[in-house]
Amino acid sequence: MNYAIIGTGAIGGFYGGKLAQAGREVHFLFHSEYEAAVAQGLRVDSVDGDFSIRPVRAYRDTHDMPACDVILVALKTTVNDRLPELLAPILRPGSLVVLIQNGLGIEADLADRLPAHVGVAGGMGFICSNRIGPAHIHHLDYGRLTVGLYRGDETKCRTFLDELADAGVETVWAPDLAEARWRKLVWNIPYNGLSVVLDTTTEALMAHPSSRALVRSLMIEVQHGAAACGITIPDTFIDEMLAMTDRMRPYKPSMRLDYDHRRPMEIEAIYSRPVREARTRGVELPRIETLERQLRFIEKKYLP
Amino acid sequence: MNYAIIGTGAIGGFYGGKLAQAGREVHFLFHSEYEAAVAQGLRVDSVDGDFSIRPVRAYRDTHDMPACDVILVALKTTVNDRLPELLAPILRPGSLVVLIQNGLGIEADLADRLPAHVGVAGGMGFICSNRIGPAHIHHLDYGRLTVGLYRGDETKCRTFLDELADAGVETVWAPDLAEARWRKLVWNIPYNGLSVVLDTTTEALMAHPSSRALVRSLMIEVQHGAAACGITIPDTFIDEMLAMTDRMRPYKPSMRLDYDHRRPMEIEAIYSRPVREARTRGVELPRIETLERQLRFIEKKYLP
């Protein structure tokens, strides 16, 4: 199988880099960092051992790339409208597109706009990884990738996971993608939004009783939203997420980094879509909706 | 009747100043501005005509003040714990204490801690007034005072309102104090909290669809909270509050001013108490509670 990495940043660069390092044929799409990638390769400083992919199969346009069996999309969901056009040149019958992105409903939206023979899966990375320079990534901790199939050939999807595991990445097969997506929201919804609205870190949110109570209330609303969609998230999972965050080093969630760099925030995929999915089934998520509206107001201030 | 003004700031200075200007005996409690008040009197620059009270009956300790018939309290609710001690020297049998303050349940809390012969009322000022210097107030617009009795002699309370009306202040008698307090919260809850959390003005909150929708949702929650307490606030009142705010000049609510000056915010009286009153009756106010918890987190950042 050959691979395409659409968006070679902290996430795409890490997983694609691991596959390439293990000898797989991996084609990387770069944007502004293309020249640096050609000149110095893709560098990954990792807690598990530093490595470089040099030369790297680098491109700045998907029209120059070959068709691929597995396409990992690691762009922000804020550009997903452009994905069908971007992916068209590298699709072949039976290609599998894996969205390593945040939020809900993104696989359904993309699948509706791709040819029926193209498979679509969702990937959720549990990883601390930053871009520290052009084509240069710092992998600080964790790395697990959870993948669930939305449509297409399960065997191909599992083969991809096997090859990733062979490359040294911890992988998890999610038999129910929607459940995995809702579980991920249990963490993403409170910490991403509150770190922006309250201009703070996960550590401070956990330290004050009022924000900690608010985090928990938001998690419980995610649980209610999931239940409206027929998905059971046990109470113990909420306790686990709180305990895990207590153990984490102070951390800026991805939405907070987007805000700090005045980039669009993934409000639609992480907040608006879950609120709508629950409302369609007669369940209101008022706390999440409050956060959604606050975030939209804040984004308007710097992206009018 | 003689009067005491406890807290001679933008609000207490205005209403007390109007009474004194009309020839009433008014005793003003000052704090740091006592010397300025003695030296230059109390100055009120008003859209209705500037005036000065000079000399002004100024004090810096209630132990030096005479007992009074009507005592207007215009301090922040954040110091209400100290009111019984502060008021003790100026109470006489039948004194009426009028709390010109924001929030819910403040009359009940104070009444429990005052002698039974002391009357307690609540006052809600609809006024744009700022303190612009020591013992110097700028009254920009409006001025209406709505007063409702919590306990005590209604005749005395109405006489106070008559004397205030004679002094040129628009007055409204509220037959149901709890209803008047909940109605005031319809405005106070969205605009105070959001102007702090979103670092903005009433004008910007009205201009963006997402914040405007959030303002309205919060108003509807106040309506639900009132309903839980047996008080009907009609939908038209919410529309009126939105329309009125559309017409207002850009305005910083009092909580935003407290935040800007790093003073304690009136979170307890404006947010926590309404949430508790509704919850006691089986009704959750999740959006208001979200705002409450965000405000407590923000306050902790500057008042640890």
Image: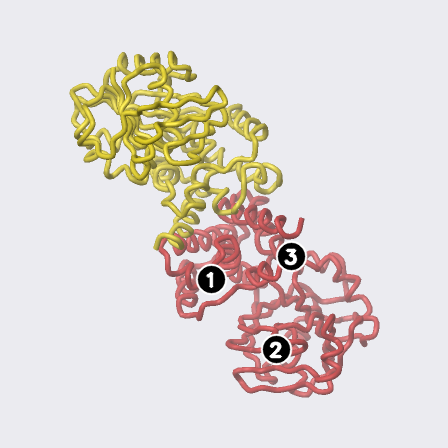
Chain colours: A yellow, B red
- Tell me the amino acid under the disc marked 1: Thr
Element type at mark 3? loop
Element type at mark 2? strand
Residue underneath mark 3: B264
Q: Earlier in the sequence, mark 1 or mark 2?
A: 2
Residue underneath mark 1: B201
In the image, is A88 to the left or to the right of A28? Answer: left
Residue at image location 80% in from the left, 71% down from the top: B61
Q: Residues within 10 Å of mark 3 (few under 14, many from 20)?
A: some
Question: Are the numbered discs 1 and 2 placed on the same chain, yes or no?
Answer: yes
Q: Would you identify the image quadrant in which residue A79 lies? A: top left
**Horizontal and vertical percent position of residue B285:** 51, 46
Question: Are the numbered discs 3 and 2 placed on the same chain, yes or no?
Answer: yes
Q: Earlier in the sequence, mark 3 or mark 2?
A: 2
Q: Residues within 10 Å of mark 1 (few under 14, many from 20)?
A: some
Instruction: Compute the Cα span from label 3 to label 2.
Output: 22 Å
- Tell me the amino acid under the disc marked 3: Pro
Residue at image location 38% in from the left, 45% down from the top: A263
> Which numbered tag is attached to residue B137?
2
